[in-house]
Amino acid sequence: MGWSASPAPDGSRPPRNTALRQLLRPLEPYLARREVTELAVNRPGELWIRSPDGWARQEMRELTAEYLDALATAMAVHSGLAVRSLASVILPGGERGQLVRAPACVDGMAPMTIRKHLPAVRTLAELEREGTFDRARDVSFHRPSAEDALRESERSDSGRLDPLDVELLALKREGRFAAFLRRAVQARRNVVIAGRTGSGKTTLTRSLIEEVPASERIVTIEDVHELALPNHPNRVHLMFGGGPGRVTAEECLAACMRLSPDRIFLAELRGSEAWEYVQSLNTGHPGSVTTTHANGAVQAFDRIASLIKNSATGRGLEVAEIRRVLHATLDVVLFMAERRVTEVYFDPLRARAVR
């Protein structure tokens, strides 16, 4: 038995599921722990618990095959999904889950994960106090001194640095990364956060969006709703997905152009929407924040270029041209590991050289 991300046959969405809440009780003590960020089950009888210290195994005899089957069924029903092999689900408390069943996995396994939902938005100042930026290092190609940056700003040609670039370079050079990011967002620089699943990308994204003036009109594009933005009243949330009747990320981006946004926030670059997203930043909607999966800040450019090249539009573009556009458009790239920013890329000299 398994579950796919397709709606129930009648198209309805069930109410909150009392049975699911009952079935979740054995897991509640672990979900309630502040330090726990994710739970995972690979097979009956064991639970894997993720925290900043890594994964820890816990034997749980109550996680029988029958219990896990009932729990997965309740999760699928709560999310309005029909019975098949795979499902991305939302739990009553806002947690995200992923279910896998045969034939999408080996017989005898019962894979599922539950990622905790963090409703409160933490400010950049709070993240700074928690040490989020303590391990960050500059991986930009050009790292001009204060004197060199000033000299570049005094050039008379089109390649000169503007005063804001000089200010941002100084903040980066001094290691004041929270202040650097705050100023970058306020000044409508485009930010990409790269990292593996569970590295803290969404938490930082929400903190960065908090720096956007509350008077601006924001449109978000997500497949799972995580960018609630409680402090931005003029907001619209668009949702995309792969199931029947769902719209694509590209369709959401096209709709954005007619919704008069000041800023567009696409939760993650993962497919053929990447080129349309980059184009939106170059057609009057700069100042965005998005995420992607990559192995480093610099490598994020290659990752996004690959996504674009594999799309229908990208097949007609030269890789060199794609990379040129990316380096000219994506101003700040961060890499996260274990909920810490470990790499910071901001290279306005390179960006101006390719424009």
Image: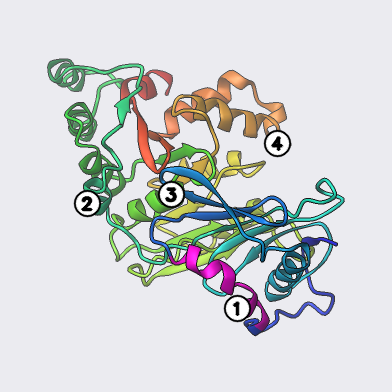
Mark 1 Cα shell of 10 Å, populated few (<14), some (14-19), many (≥20): some
Q: Determine the residue positioned at 34% across, 54% down.
A: 207
Which badge, 2 or 1, comes first in the chain's sequence?
1
CA distance separating discs 3 and 2 = 26 Å
CA distance separating discs 3 and 1 = 42 Å
Front of the two marks 2 and 1: 1
Front of the two marks 4 and 3: 4
Q: At label 3, which amino acid type do we have?
A: His
Residue at the spot of label 1: 21
CA distance separating discs 4 and 3 = 22 Å
Task: Left or right? Give the position of 148 relative to 30.
Answer: left
Q: Determine the residue positioned at 77% across, 66% down.
A: 69
Q: Where's residue 294, x and y in %?
A: 53, 32
Q: Regarding mark 2 in the picture, which secondary structure is present there?
A: helix
Q: Regarding mark 1 in the picture, which secondary structure is present there?
A: helix
Which badge, 2 or 4, comes first in the chain's sequence?
2
